Image (cartoon, coloured by chain):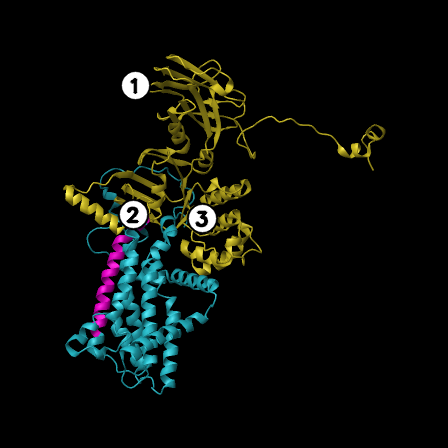
Chain colours: A yellow, B cyan
Amino acid sequence: MGRNAIELEAVSKRYRLGEHHGQGLDLRDALAALAARVRRGERRRAEEIWSLRGVDLEVPEGTALGVVGRNGAGKSTLLRVVNHITAPTEGVCRTRGRIGSLLEVGTGFHKELTGLENTYLNGAILGMTKAEVSARLDEIVAFAGLEGFMDTPVKRYSSGMYLRLGFSVAAHMEADILLVDEVLAVGDAEFQRRCLGKMGEVERSGRTVLFVSHDQHAIARLCETSVWLDRGQVRMAGPTEAVLRAYHASDAHGTVVQLPEDARTPAQVVKTSVVDESYQPRDSFPLDEVPRIAVGLVVRERIPGLDVAVLVSNARGVALLDLAMTDAGRPSLDVPGRYVVECRLPHLLVPDEYRVSIWVGTQYETVEMHEGVLSFLVEGEERDRRRAVRAEAGWRAARVDDHLRGSARALGGSSA
Amino acid sequence: MSDPTGPASAPAGPVPAPAGPAPASAGRHQHGWVVNAPAKGWWAPLRLSQLWTSRELVAFFALRDLRVRYKQAFFGGAWAVVQPLIGALAFTVLFHRVVGVDVEGGSYFAFALVGYAVWGYVTSTVQNGAGSLLNNADLITKVSFPLIVAPAATLLPPLVDLAVALVLGTAVALATGSLPSAWAVVELPLGLALLVLAVVAPVAYFSATVVKYRDVLPLVVFGLQFVLFVTPIAYPPEMVSEPWRLWLYLNPVAGAVGALRAALVGTSAPAAGELALSTAVGVLLGVVGLVRFRRGEREFADIV
């Protein structure tokens, strides 16, 4: 068995609220706060967040490890600790070999400097020597597709060119460990394909990859093994397929969700589920079947114009649908009582993972909003299609050259 | 780095390590591991060798600042010549003509040029250096690189202005008939080294402090104006009577400017004891500043 490239022992990371990505502090504010505490005789009491809590992890050399988890689960903090950007509050993180990062490509570019100057500067920031950059300069420029633009200041670059150069410099560093976080969410489809290809190349060459993404198809494609982080802790580690399955099946969102009743609320959702045409809970649907969202609702007070909406977003977090019941011409739920509301989703979802949010409210106020409470999968092959939804359009095709001549009948479609 | 055991060994899954202190980890603190752990105690290793290993990055940072400055500057390089001349002229009018400060056996203008050069170096490095981490906040929070590089690189670009002003001062001294000292080969490098050493402490200390308390930056700028009065920049140290004169050299800049003037404009050199005092204080404060930096370093990315 190979050596480990990354080891974490009981790593915890605490952030004080207001510090994390804050705007720093003022000495004046700090002194004022100190004076206030002294006057009131208080002990220092900062609100804290444990972004990582006792994480133990070993990543053998040559492994591509996927990291999944909800927002705020500690994925980015994990990468920052492994990348030595920030130190753990407790515990030890050890890495072996040079670390390359595709976390924030193009960071450190200076707008006034040319593409070439920035390539050397960025290379040096990432830890490359000048000789290394020189040796790979042609590759870097070619991969970024920026031949002929290297003597232009990057302030004249488009955001796409900027990004491509940044990625290209980072990707051409000879790293033993490569850290990737959501970089694929940017850039056009063609460039994303090349990025994925490059990462596969890196992994096959026996280097270690740590890949954080919401795009679970990409994780499944690149990583044999994955960890699932949940509120700063490792909830599960193992083969990617099993981890992803368990991650999907986790409680906070699912196909059937019961919510505790609270008699003080004027109206509330008590149960919601994803069901198929025969009203059976289902978590995945073939392309030609349509999921229905069922919502059990208790209305305790008379709320004129009470409406229910179903919001659907895809795995990349793009909000696709916001379907309100009254938009479909249904009457609002003004009279108190128990309701079951059903929403048949339109036939336009492509194969992907979807999150469903339920909203209850009126034109004037939100009574309840359950963010991402349900999830389901639409199965099928969706290769090389650049679309978030599928829809039918009206098509017509006619040969215009015949019309132009005004003699379509006579020539019968043949032309010189 | 390829797997030495060969491609046959299938990559095993990530294994949550056994909880508690694993005895197997005893041998892992060999070279090859880079360790990321919380800082402990009041001392932090200075790790000055990091500056050497990342010298290319220091150079790139310094070059970036120089290039950007001259790409944006309307006067370009001419400014480096005009600025010290105007500054030294102001010193001459104010201190020489109005107050009546004089230097034995030489031109006050040349004397003021060297003083202005030294003080210009101190103010630009301390101001830029104190703000250096803040100015690179984007990089620090997103990219992993030796953070000491950012303040270290700010020590280099002002050397250009320093050199220009020192050359001007020497030229004026020669023109007015004072010859450079025979010891210039010793005094010049000594003065330059002492000058750079003198700014290490404030740059390291305040760059780390400003990350946390931004409003310290204007305080630093204000403090510099005060320090100017207790540094023999506009006046020669001889103006301070004997029992107090030694106190001037608690400020390492005093030793630096004394050595540089002795080398270039022919004023009398500081005594060996005075130079030693300046150097000792410079080293001591430098270590304090660097320890402060190294201790704070690990949380810069969290608070900047």
Determine which residue is flagged by label 2: A87
Let me know if residue A344 appears in the view. Answer: no
Q: Residues within 10 Å of mark 1 (few under 14, many from 20)?
A: few
Q: Which residues are magenta?
A: B276-303
**Disc 1/disc 2 C-alpha distance (Å):** 43 Å
Determine if marks 3 and 1 fall on one subunit: yes
As drawn, the label of residue B284 is: none
**Quarter where residue B68 is shown:** bottom left
Q: Secondary structure at mark 3?
A: loop
**Image marks 1 and 2: residues in contact by CB distance under 8 Å:** no
Residue B284 lies within the magenta run: yes
Sequence-earlier tag: 1 or 2: 2
- Image x and y of residue A200, in percent: 48, 42
Three-letter code, disc 1: Asp
Determine which residue is flagged by label 1: A262
Determine if marks 3 and 2 fall on one subunit: yes
Camera-near label (1 vs 2) is 1
**Disc 3/disc 1 C-alpha distance (Å):** 48 Å
Determine if marks 1 and 2 fall on one subunit: yes
**Disc 3/disc 2 C-alpha distance (Å):** 22 Å
